[in-house]
Amino acid sequence: MSLACIHTHTLFCDGSDDIETCCRAAFQKGFACLGFSAHNPILKKTGIDNGCNLPDEKLEEYISEVLAAKKRWEGKLPVYLGLEVDFIENLTGPADRDLHELGLDFIIGSVHYVLPPKGEPFAVDDKAERIERGIREGYGGDPMGMVEAYLNAEIAMIRSGGFDLLGHPDLVKKNNFKKDGDQNMLFSEDAALYLEKTAAIAALMGEKGIPAEVNTGGISRGKTKDCYPSLAFLKLFRRHGVAMVINADAHKAEHLDGYYDEAKKSMLEAGYKESLIFEGRQNGRALWRSESL
Ligand SMILES: [Zn+2]
Ligand SMILES: [Zn+2]
C-alpha cells in the first residue's frame, strides 16, 4: 500500500510546520503524493474568528506557496493544492462558488461547527470545556442535541455538494473519550439516533459516489482511540460502496503517516480490499487510483 496524505495543515492555519518541511517529510517517508488542505477562510463569510482557519487576507499567499512547492518538487513528489472547507449551514460550505474559482486540485468537505438554536455556534472538536458549555447553553444540557445537529449538518453538506472527499465523518466523537480509558463520555455510538443518522450519511455518500476519508488525526493527537470513522460507521460506508482514502489530518510533519497501520487494519476489518490515492484534477473532476491495502 502506498502512503499518501491530502489532509495536511501548516503554519498558514493551525498546523505547526511550514509547507517545505511537510514536503521534505513526505518525500523522506516515500509518499505517493502530498496534498495541502488549509482550513478555508470563514471570518468574512460567517463572522466566526477562531484562530484556526486561514485568515481571508492570507488565501492568495497560501495558494502561491503551495504552487511554488508543486514546482520545486516536480519529478520527486506530486504536491497538490487543496482546502478543507467548513460547512456551516446557511452561511458557507464547499458549494460556495468563489472556492471553485481558485484553481484548487481538491476540496475536502468537513463539518466542524454546529449552530445551536440558542447560544453561540461552536466547533465540536474544540476543547472539552467549550463543548460542555455549548451543550449546556445550546442544547439544554443534552449531548445528543449536538450530535444530531452535527450529523444533520453533514447530511446537508453532502446534499449541497461541491467537495471531492468527505472529511472525518464522525468528528463529533472527539470529546467522547478521556485519556484514562473512559469512553462514551457524552453519548453512545450505539444510540438509535446515531445509528440511523450515520446509516443515512453512508447511503447518501454511496448515492453521490464521493469518497470519504479514514482519518488518523484523532489518534495522533491523543484524542481518540480509533480512526474517524469508527469501525461500525466504516462498515456502513462499505455496505454502501463508498471508497475510502487514508489521511493523517496532519498538523505536524512528523504525523504525516501516523497510525496508518490502524487505518489499514480497520479498513480490512470492515471488508475493504482497496483504498484510493489522489492523482490530481482533470476536466473539473478529482482523479483517484485504487490500491490494494
Ligand atoms: Zn477538520
Ligand atoms: Zn483537518
Image (cartoon, helix red, strand yellow):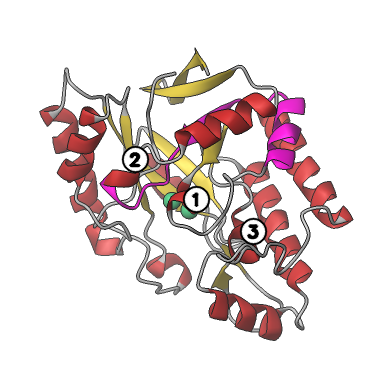
| Distance from Cα at disc 2 to Cα at disc 1 | 12 Å
- Picture coordinates of residue 274 (x, y %)? 57, 18
Mark 3 beta carbon near ligand 1 (under 8 Å): no
288 vs 28, left or right, is: right
190 vs 226, left or right, is: right
Q: Label 2: few (<14), some or many (≥20) within 10 Å?
A: many
Label 2 vs label 1, nearer the camera: 1
276 vs 40, left or right, is: right
Q: Which of 233 and 102 is in front in this view?
A: 233
Element on which disc 3 rests: helix
Asked whether disc 2 touches disc 1, contact meaning CB atoms under 8 Å apart, the reply is: no
Earlier residue among tags 2 and 3: 3
Q: Mark 1 sits on what residue?
A: 219
For the N terminus, the quadrant is: top left
Q: Residue at x 23, y 50 (%)?
A: 62
Q: Nearer the viewer, residue 240 or 270?
A: 270
- Picture coordinates of residue 156 (x, y %)? 68, 51
Q: Mark 2 sits on what residue?
A: 256
Q: What span is in magenta?
A: 231-253
Q: Label 1: few (<14), some or many (≥20) within 10 Å?
A: some
| Distance from Cα at disc 2 to Cα at disc 3 | 22 Å
Earlier residue among tags 3 and 1: 3
| Distance from Cα at disc 3 to Cα at disc 1 | 12 Å
Q: Which residue is drawn at 54% across and 28% down?
A: 264
Magenta segment: does it hold 238? yes
